[in-house]
Image: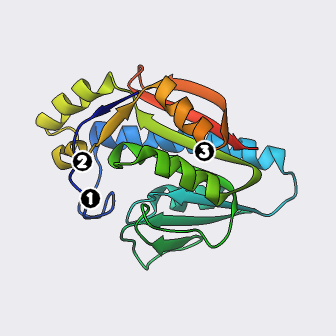
Amino acid sequence: MAKQISTAKRSHSYGQQRTFRGLEDFAVRRRLFRARSFLDLLVSENPGKELQCLELGCGFWGRNLAALSQGYPGVEFTGVDLSVTSETHGFDLIEADLTTWIPKVTYDGVLSLAVIEHLLDPQAHFDLIAKCLRKDGLAGLTTPAPQGHFVLKKLARLGIFDRQEIKDHKLYLTQTGLKALADCAGLSVEQYREFSMGMNQWMLLRKA
C-alpha cells in the first residue's frame, strides 16, 4: 500500500525558504494544470453558483491560489498551511497544522497537491478532505507514485530538486492504497491518472 520513508516532522511550509526553478518549477506547473482542469469541472457542474474551494497544504505564498483566483472569479479560494504569508490578493490563507486543524465550514471543492506524501497518517488526511467537503463535493489530489522515489532522490542529489523537500517525503502510495484510503473516508474515486511519465498520480474524488 505504501513505502515508508521518513518520520521527521515538517517545520515550515512549501516554498517558504526558497523559490522554484527549472524542472522543479515545471513539476509545480504540471500540478497547477491538474488544478485548473479540476476547477473547470467544478464550475461546469455548478453553473451560476458562487463556489468555495479549499487547498490543503497551499504553501507559504499560496502560489496555486494566486494563479487560480485570476482565472476563476466566481470561486472563493482559501488555503491552509503550517505557516502562510499575510500578503494575499484575491484569496484567503489560514495558518494551521493540517494534522490538527478542524474546518469551521465546508467547501464545494478541495485540492491537495503534493501534500499527502509529507504526512505520517495518510488516512487522517483523506478523512480531513471528507470533513471539508460538502455533500457531492469534489476533491483533487496529486502525489508521487512509488516508482518516482528513485528518480526524485537522484534529482535531489543533483540539486535539480530540493534535497530537504524530497527527504521530507514520508511515504509513497500506490493506486490501490490511495483507493483504499478514499473508500475508508467515504470518498468515491471518479478518475485516476498517472502523469509526468508515470512518476506522479492524480485522483478525482467525490463525497457521497
Question: Which residue is the extreme one toward the left?
Answer: 157
Q: Are marks 2 and 1 in contact (CB under 8 Å)?
A: yes
- Residue drawn at x 48%, y 41% is 31
Q: Nearer the viewer, mark 2 or mark 3?
A: 3
| Residue 130 sits above or below residue 144 on the image | below
> Which quarter of the figure is the C terminus placed in?
top right
**For the residue carrying disc 3, how many other residues have a C-alpha within 10 Å: few (<14), some (14-19), or many (20+)?**
some
Q: Earlier in the sequence, mark 2 or mark 1?
A: 1
Q: Which residue is mark 2?
A: 168
**For the residue carrying disc 1, how many other residues have a C-alpha within 10 Å: few (<14), some (14-19), or many (20+)?**
some
**For the residue carrying disc 2, how many other residues have a C-alpha within 10 Å: few (<14), some (14-19), or many (20+)?**
some
| Residue 32 sits above or below residue 49 on the image | above
The image shows residue 28 at horizontal and vertical percentages of 41, 44
| Residue 95 sits above or below residue 167 on the image | below
The image shows residue 79 at horizontal and vertical percentages of 52, 64
Residue type indicated by callout 3: Ala
Q: Earlier in the sequence, mark 2 or mark 3?
A: 2
Element type where label 2 sits in the image: loop
Whole-number angstrom distance, CA of label 2 to CA of label 1:
7 Å
Image-quadrant location for residue 89: bottom right
- Residue drawn at x 73%, y 41% is 41
Whole-number angstrom distance, CA of label 2 to CA of label 3:
25 Å
The image shows residue 14 at horizontal and vertical percentages of 33, 57
Q: Earlier in the sequence, mark 3 or mark 1?
A: 1
Q: Which residue is mark 1?
A: 10
Q: Is residue 120 left or right of residue 36?
A: left
Asked whether the viewer can see residue 181, the reply is yes
- Residue drawn at x 19%, y 43% is 167
Res. 185 mark? 3
Along the viewing direction, whichever of 52 and 159 lies nearer the viewer:
52
- Residue drawn at x 29%, y 43% is 170
